[in-house]
Amino acid sequence: MAGTAVRRQAPGDEPVTTDIPARMDRLPWVRWHWVVIVALGITWILDGLEVTIVGSIAAVLTNRQTLALTDAQVGLAGTIYIVGAVIGAIFFGYLTDRLGRKRLFMITLLMYLLATIATAFSWSAWAFFVFRFFTGGGIGGEYAAINSAIDELIPARVRGWTDLAINGSWWVGTAAGAAATIVLLNPNFLPVDVGWRVAFALGAILGFCVLLIRRFLPESPRWLMVHGRQDEAEKVVREIEQRVRREAGEDLPEPDEEPIEIHPRSHTPVGEILRTMFKQNGKRTVLGLSLMTGQAFAYNAVFFTYGLMLTTFFKVSDSSVPYFILPFAVGNFIGPLTIGRLFDTVGRKSMIAGTYILSGLLLAITGWMFANTAFFNEISLTIAWSIIFFFASTGASAAYLTVSEIFPLEVRANAISFFYAFGTGIGGAIGPLLFGALVGSGSRSNVLIGYLIGAALLVVAGGIEIWLGVNAEQRPLEDVARPLSAEGGDRAADEEGEAPAKQAS
């Protein structure tokens, strides 16, 4: 069908009326949407793969036949990766809103690819540190570019489940990394100084294949429309509609949303970005900070000390740790994949609050059992963690979904990068550091304290979701957070009433 006729406008000219968001949201699900998921969602798999590989090769890197790192340097490498991810998220997040989704998700993946290849050829501790920093920078930048593109290309009625499933795929990378290191770090298969290098090379090969697929993905037509590139936006949408019509084998339904009036702009000044996030949308910022901090602390605290818990309290050998990571990763991935659909039907607020509060309570119970029950062994702990993070993983994925859909299009990538950087910086630094010290004490009672802190953060975040959560299920992005360039788009979301969610079709 033909879209609303629009002409190309230079930023600052007369407003343009467009039905592009409505036309994107009414598209039926076809093979093209799966291509988008695979091409963009690989980011989380790569990140999970990276984190697991580095955790698994820690002992190998201290070997004199490899890089001969000290234990402190191994920990420093993890911190440097996190610092790179935080800086990369902020820097590339700003560029993603200014220069476009596609340009940045190509640049950030290329940066990750080159840095990972370089890591495989590290010749010293400092070379390893530098390459890990840039690897983290590429991954951090990916989060902003990819979450923005996914939300703007996927129909509103399935945006929640799709986003959760993609974010949950981090654990596919974790499982793959654990399985790969079982073989690659076995000296019976590869020499000690070769296996860990091959592990990084596998991530680079996967990244290169995805880079080729991404070349065929379009720029976000929503981003194009607000930047005065109406002709390009129309061309992209027409091409998508033609492909969807061909793959669906039927005519496309009529849009059921009203056209939107846009005042094109070349970019959004930093001052307006800050004012939009912290003044006009202050309550939503509090919501995003609570969700991201709660999940980041709990996740990083538990996962980054997983092996240490097993080896310290249950005397599990280093080589056996990956076998315990595999079922844990499976539970984390199945959660978003199965109950994720309820976030589009039952609703965001009840499901996010429910997963956070339930996982927090289960974490507290598990901590008490670990500290006070003699028969609680490594298998019991792994089963408990798998159940807890079946729900916690879904809630954590929903945190990324929340911060990517409750802010206006013009600041979306900046918002994602800010919350990712804050959550990663706080949770990634404090959580593992605190838990590492508690586990290192050898006292189960001390570890219980860490569990209770993580549980409290999750429960509090769930309560804040009940208080400040947004009913975004099945609603167009432009309805959840009106673009700044739209008529009336400078209104504070905190002062607007919540529109009712559409019923599931």
Image (spheres, helix red, strand yellow):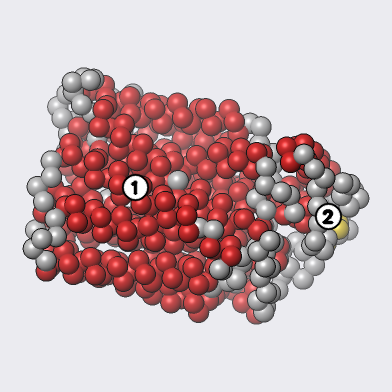
As shown in the figure, which amino acid type bears the numbered disc 1?
A: Ala
Residue sitting at x 13%, y 45%: 316
Q: Residue at x 25, y 55 (%)?
A: 383
The relative height of residue 247 versus residue 67 in the rendered view (above or below) is below
Quarter of image, res 357? bottom left
Q: Secondary structure at mark 1?
A: helix
Q: Nearer the viewer, residue 247 or 306?
A: 247
Where the C terminus falls, by quadrant?
Answer: bottom right
- Mark 1 and 2 residues: CB-CB less than 8 Å, in contact? no
Image location of residue 202, percent across then percent down: 39, 27
In the picture, measured across the screen, residue 160 lies left or right of residue 480, that is left
Q: Which residue is mark 1?
A: 329
* Residue 466 in view: yes
Packing grade of label 2 (10 A; few <14, some 14-19, many >=20) is few
Numbered mark located on residue 254 in the image? 2
Q: Position of residue 319 (x, y in %)?
A: 17, 36
**Left or right of 234: which side holds 141?**
left
102 relative to 120, above or below = below
Residue at point 81%, 57% (across, down): 255
Please, is residue 194 above or below residue 282 in the view? above
